[in-house]
Amino acid sequence: MPASSQIARASDACLHCGSPVPVGAASRDFCCAGCEAVYGLLRAQGLTRYYQLTQGKAAPAPEPRKDRGFAWLEPLVSRAEAVPGPVCALELDVQGIHCAACVWLMNELFRRQQGGAGLTVDPALGKVSMQWRRGAFDVSGFLRTVEDFGYLFGPSRKHPEAASLDLPIRLGICAALAMNVMLFSVSFYVGLTPEDGDVFRLFTRLSVVLSTGVVMVGGWPFFRSAAQGLRRGVLHLDLPIALGILLVFGTSLVQARGGRGDLAYFDTLNTFVTLMLVGRWLQQRVLERNRRFLLEDDGAEGLFVRRQEGERLSTVRAAEVGEGDVLVIAPGDLVPVDAVLLDADASVSTDWITGEPGERAVTRGDALPAGAFNAGREAVRVRASQAFTDSPLVALLRRAPAGTGSAAVHTRFWDRVSRRWVVTVLLVSGLGLALWWPAGPDKALEVAVALLVVTCPCAIGIATPLAYELVQARLRRDGFFVRSPDLMDRLPRVRKVLFDKTGTLTLGRLELVDRASVDALSSEARDVAFDLTSRSNHPASRCLSAALARVGARFNAEARVTEHSGQGVELTRDGVCWRLGRAQWAMEGQGASRVENSHLSGAAEPDGSRDAQSLADVAAPTPSLTSLERDCALGTEPESRIAAGATSASGPVLTRDGMLVATFALRESVRSDARREVQALQAEGRSVWLISGDAPARVRDMAEALGIPTAHALGGQRPEDKASTVAALDAADTLYLGDGVNDSLAFERALCAGTPAIDRPVMPGKSDFFLLGEGLASIREALRLSLRLRQVVRRLLMLAVAYNVVAVTVCLSGWMTPLRAALAMPATSLATVLFTVWSLSAARERPASTPTQLREVPA
């Protein structure tokens, strides 16, 4: 049973994606909130055929984002509509496509939209092409509808990699040619000799011509890779493969030109090249699929903003923003530079730059930090205090230079293997030539060619990529998506696991401590509370709105809700004043001053972090958490405290004419398996660290609740601090998991890095892997399978060495013939493939309930 199955009840599978539901999850039916939300949408809109098409192979759904900006879309639509004609066309990238059901769903949603002319979805590349009738189609409305189901759209940046188009074509050509050469070789094996005259010469020439095509078409990727490696001073397995192809082809060509095509190894060479291409295709297939699952990241070039130019409003790249520019920030859009608010008030969120959730109200003249998002419902105007070149975002958005970090350490092993393999092959071939030279040049050359054929790393070339493909596909089913081709080689070295806090160990959202507070409401109070919360975008209101919707609260479209800055929301119905927000405000008279466009307050919000202060000293601290709030934030069974009478947690309250109706205690939602996985990692011999920009006291409290040593809990970390901490800890053995752009610099310093935040820009493009779902168990499973993969690969090497010892002995004895070589090479390849599949199948079934202590990995 795989390790991930240990965290789930045997009968519990997510109703949406089929993944195991972690013990302690908020719902017994869904593995994450995203799956629950999408499942509800599919049922509500009559789209359940989606599940018939997935055939149980859906991926966990990211939680739909309601606050996403579309500034990038406006210039694209304008250009599309500027083209003459009744029909407009636009091509976009899409994130999240994984099967035919996704294609059907998008086409069905497009069919229901008025004004659409045609939609083409390319699931292999992750692109969508749409056509619509001019003036009759709402492009942004359609995109928002689709994004409600967990997908994301972006500008068209994805392009098929050359290898993804090139390799299948080369493989098909080589397979066809190789089969024909094998037919000609059969005639040699069954008795066709030079004495047969024209037929023998014809078959020999055809073998030469077709084999030349195989070497040119199929060998080119290996020749190119080997040459590039030599130019960089890097040796890898493509070098012995390339040398083997050239030497075997050259010597077989000499035999054929001497009239002895029956002594050449053309059929073996063709089979070898074809199998190597199969291995290379397997090596790239899963990685390309994982990369195309995400949107392409253009860093700073991918950020757009609306700039006011007189009476015009232009959408420009963030890089074009200069000091003094007036920018219009729509709901969900990013403030790319430090700026000053020009409008009366606004609500902003800085979770992307600080990694900590929470929104705060700002008023005219207040400073806004670069990286803040407009969390309100209306667009606001700001004046840039700096040019984008001076923005702190520039350093955080940059791409790491190639070759930086600790990733290069893993290449040492394959460098040594390649170097020793090449030297050994050449020495053994030379030895065979020298030993048999007294018997005549022809016999000596025959032995040397046989040695080159049997010592080519054929088995490794196909079995090793297959092993990587099997492991990566297995992890993909667990929600662990590998992006870097060398990640599985680095993971066995991991001895330290470093977590960011909010959005990583927690889910970046609030949840109810006790659902009974909602269940106990009367139908009238429930409907009123739903009207209040559904019209606010604050995290606390989103949490309560979802909880109320689950118990059947009804929405009144005629309700008129007023928001009070920093206090809460208010609704008057039938002469009765209802309020939801801070207790002191909600329970007083109705004379509170009203300020529009604020947000619901009263939940435990994080205070200003050093990350925010480093970008702009505008963070306003909120009151400190009570002990109960800390328990709620850490998920440490607060219900028992409430039952014992500890009701001092501040939370939004619902009042009716100033009389208390209900109190809703909220907590920061922690991943259900966080404590279990942290302790399991430590039990396996890995040290776990908590590095966060949140207040040090909160970080220490969470570390204590999760079982992380207090000395390993570092709070108040700026982006530069995180990077320095990782650099100090890393000895080519750290794994860093983070979600905010404040983790960007730390990503560059760690041996390997990943993110669960695929709905925000930058971080997915910088990561070696990304996670779907709300559990962390797939990280430990990836570490376990990487160790198993390393064992399998090294056993493959041992088998290859053992086979070559036997084969070399046979060759030096003069017993190797083209027929025997043609049989031995595919037989050993098949044996190693079967061994690989069996080994990794056994790894999938091995119980993982008992942690295994790690041993040091040699450099």
Image (cartoon, helix red, strand yellow):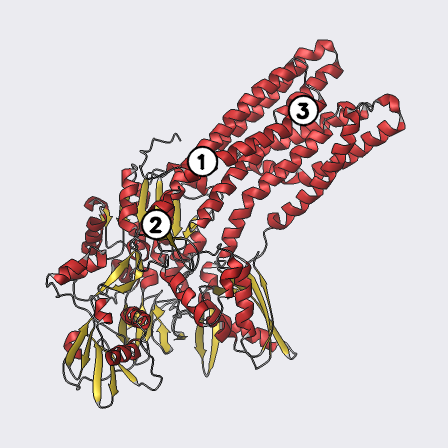
SS at mark 2 in the image: strand
Place of residue 327 in the rendered image (x, y in percent of width and height, measured from the top left): 40, 75
- Do labels 2 and 1 touch, CB within 8 Å? no
Q: Could you say whether the residue bearing mark 1 is in a helix, strand or loop?
A: helix
Binning the other alpha carbons within 10 Å of mark 3 as few (below 14), some (14 to 19) or many (20 upward) gives: many
Residue type for callout 2:
Ala
The residue where tag 2 is placed is 8
Amino acid on which the number 3 mark rests in the picture: Ala
To which quarter of the image does residue 732 belong?
top left
Q: Which mark is residue 821?
A: 3
**Residue type (three-letter) at the residue carrying disc 1:** Ala
Q: Nearer the viewer, residue 609 or 700?
A: 700
Residue at image x 53%, y 52%? Answer: 289
Q: Nearer the viewer, residue 431 or 725?
A: 431
Q: Give SS at disc 3.
A: helix
For residue 842, the mark is: 1
